[in-house]
Amino acid sequence: MLVHLFFLLPATWVALRVHGFNKALSMAELPPLSPKRPELPAMAFAQRCAELTAIAASNGLYRANCLHQSLALCHVLQRHGLPTRLKIGVLPRARPFKAHAWVELDGIPLGQQPVADYAAFDRLGTAPDDAHFI
């Protein structure tokens, strides 16, 4: 899995540059190759994949940002039949502007990064109801 992620992260960077966000997201959300389920319980498997993604991002060909990591992780977990969701949020009133991307499984953020302070978008181009932007 780690070797796969070492190659998937740069491929994600290329996909974003060549095809843009919407196409890269649709590529990350491809249907599973087969109905196989991970051997570990789903949440433990997803959290381990998030850890491996962070390792690959910090030790791979380049330092992948949170969007690249989230798209790659979403792709891997979707291919294993897990219904993950890519989330993007902003820090309200932050100067300079700060945004963050992460992956959720059953509404639970994967990985170690804190996401509670970020106002997440439900759909691309729509702000959450409780977001207050200056």
Image (cartoon, rainbow, N blue to C red):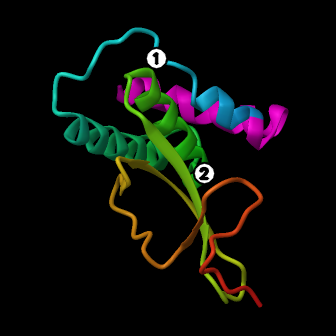
Residue depicted at x 40% and y 8%: 34
Badge 1 element: loop
Q: Residue at x 46, y 17 (%)?
A: 32
**Crowding near the residue tagged with mark 1, few <14, some 14–19, many ≥20 C-alpha atoms within 10 Å:** some
**Residue 71 or residue 53, whichever sits in front:** 71
Quadrant of the drawing holding the N terminus: top left
Residue matched to label 2:
67
Quadrant of res 29: top right
Q: Is residue 70 above or below residue 76?
A: below
Residue 57 x, y percent position in the rendering? 48, 45
Q: Which residue is mark 1?
A: 32
The x, y position of residue 48, in whole percent, is 26, 41
Real-space CA distance between mark 2 and mark 1, rounded to the nearest whole angstrom? 21 Å
Q: Main secondary structure of the magenta part?
A: helix
Identify the residue at image location x=56%, y=50%: 63
The amino acid on which the numbered mark 2 sits, given as a three-letter code, is Leu
